Image: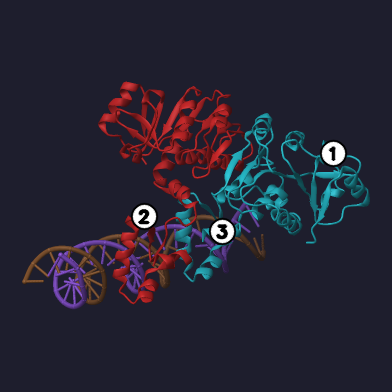
Chain colours: A red, B cyan, C purple, D brown
Amino acid sequence: MMSLLEERQSCSIAELAQRFSVSEETIRRDVRRLETSGRARKVHGGVSLAGGGMEAPFVQRVNDNAAAKRAIAAHCAAMVCEGMTLLIDSGTTSLWFTRAISHVHGLTIITNSFEVAREVMGRNDNRLFFAGGDVNIDYRAAFGADAIALSRRFAPDLAILSIGAIEAGRGLLDFEPEEAFYKQAVFDLARRVMLLADASKFGREGSVFVAGLDRVHDLVTDRMPPPEIIADLTRAGTDLHVVTG
Amino acid sequence: MMSLLEERQSCSIAELAQRFSVSEETIRRDVRRLETSGRARKVHGGVSLAGGGMEAPFVQRVNDNAAAKRAIAAHCAAMVCEGMTLLIDSGTTSLWFTRAISHVHGLTIITNSFEVAREVMGRNDNRLFFAGGDVNIDYRAAFGADAIALSRRFAPDLAILSIGAIEAGRGLLDFEPEEAFYKQAVFDLARRVMLLADASKFGREGSVFVAGLDRVHDLVTDRMPPPEIIADLTRAGTDLHVVTG
DNA sequence: AACAAAAAACCACAAAATGTCACACAACAG
DNA sequence: CTGTTGTGTGACATTTTGTGGTTTTTTGTT
């Protein structure tokens, strides 16, 4: 069955059932197992290969929890006004933020994210500085020493950061060491650091330490965090903004 | 449906409905979802890609003389093999070249062009280094000192360059000083410099001097250049490849 | 500018398709 | 014999689709 999926990128349940002369329910059970083992993914009416098209993970991440991310982004966008200098990192929520400020003119934007850059280039009344170098294709961004060096040239009014996970007692964590390293470097630059994190980040466990909550001036999220994290926030002096979707 | 939108920049509801044999209302619903997730945007009577598309003047330049550029690109692509290190500049012909090498694996690509970078990121079995810094939004590329500094780190096997104009007696000229400056810097780096220029470049007059023809190892074009330029080429020791569309 | 006709978009509800669950049955190894 | 595993069946939940009616937008005409 996997070999059939290798040829055809995807297949319908009904077709597979007929192909193997078994009931559709049997196919569905097998598909469920394949999904839990990560080798295929279900879609309504059929199955498709998991790894099909390496672009999928990024697009998927952008659309995960889109409503919450959009609301958070819109809230932050209200604090941006003409002529500001912004540093925007490579998270998916940051991308929503970039879309949300598309109507503000005369900004200077520094970013290491290709998606953010693309969004900014849509309107050409902004100044754009791109932190390049070694590109992580999965993340569509550059994290290496060159990206850090370029970012360090600036003293942005505001830095917009996303994060992989927020854990009580630990602070901010991420999954990719390079990404974490880049973020550490930019914490010092901005006069104000705003962290955009939908509520799903509170449940996650990261694998690389990035920074303590005290480095963040504002945390913008869509649901009230668990009490231990609220305690950490007050201790760190971080302002908490909960955007009611 | 997204893949159909990738090819055609936009599409009408009625056409999509007929294409997939479903009712128009179903299409509208799907489009609404695509819009809330930010991947497409609705227009009256149809859908179009969200930020996806390039800016009108740019996409026009890319498609100008597309057949010739594609043929030139295909010819050059034949000289690329697995594992090479390539520097690709920001011209529109270079973009066609990048598309033409999409089937070659394991390349290391250095570029200062966002469009080239985007094309490379489509397949993630290449290594990508992006020369960033101050971004020229009209050209969708970075030309500044930072871009030069990063590019200088490399010694590519092959550099793929485009040019604004080729004049007899003068050599290579461009229209944007910054772009010219960047190109001057990269001429020294590559072991072999290949210039991609459709025949329209021979008639043009540029405004900024870039380099003499002697810096170019190969000139690939689609029609025989005027005799004075052929004389210059032989004098400079440049190989001339004329691709018969 | 005003107005009417036409096209397109939206909404709500019913119908169809698909997915899920629980249970019964058969094959089979220990 | 018994427990395990896989399969099929039917009831039920969920998702998706089509349809009719209504509202909004565009277009053409005066």
Question: Is residue A57 visible from the viewing direction of this image?
Answer: yes
Mark nearest the camera among 3 and 1 is 1
The amino acid beneath tag 2 is Gly
Rendered image quadrant of residue B205: top right
Residue sitting at x 39%, y 67%: A1
- CA gap between label 2 and label 3 equals 29 Å
In the image, which disc is placed on residue B212? 1
| Distance in Å between CA atoms under marks 3 and 1 | 43 Å
Q: Which chain carries label 1?
A: B
Q: Specify whether A31 is left or right of B110.
A: left
Q: Which residue is drawn at 56% across and 35% down?
A: A104
Kindly identify the residue that appears in the image at 87 percent across and 53 percent down.
Answer: B225
The residue to which callout 2 is attached is: A38
SS for callout 2? loop
Label 3 is found on which chain of the structure?
A: B
> Which one is earlier in the sequence, the residue at label 3 or at label 1?
3
Q: Which mark is residue B5?
A: 3
Are discs 1 and 2 both within one chain?
A: no
What x and y, as percent, mark residue C23?
A: 14, 69
Residue A59 in the image: x percent, y percent?
A: 47, 49
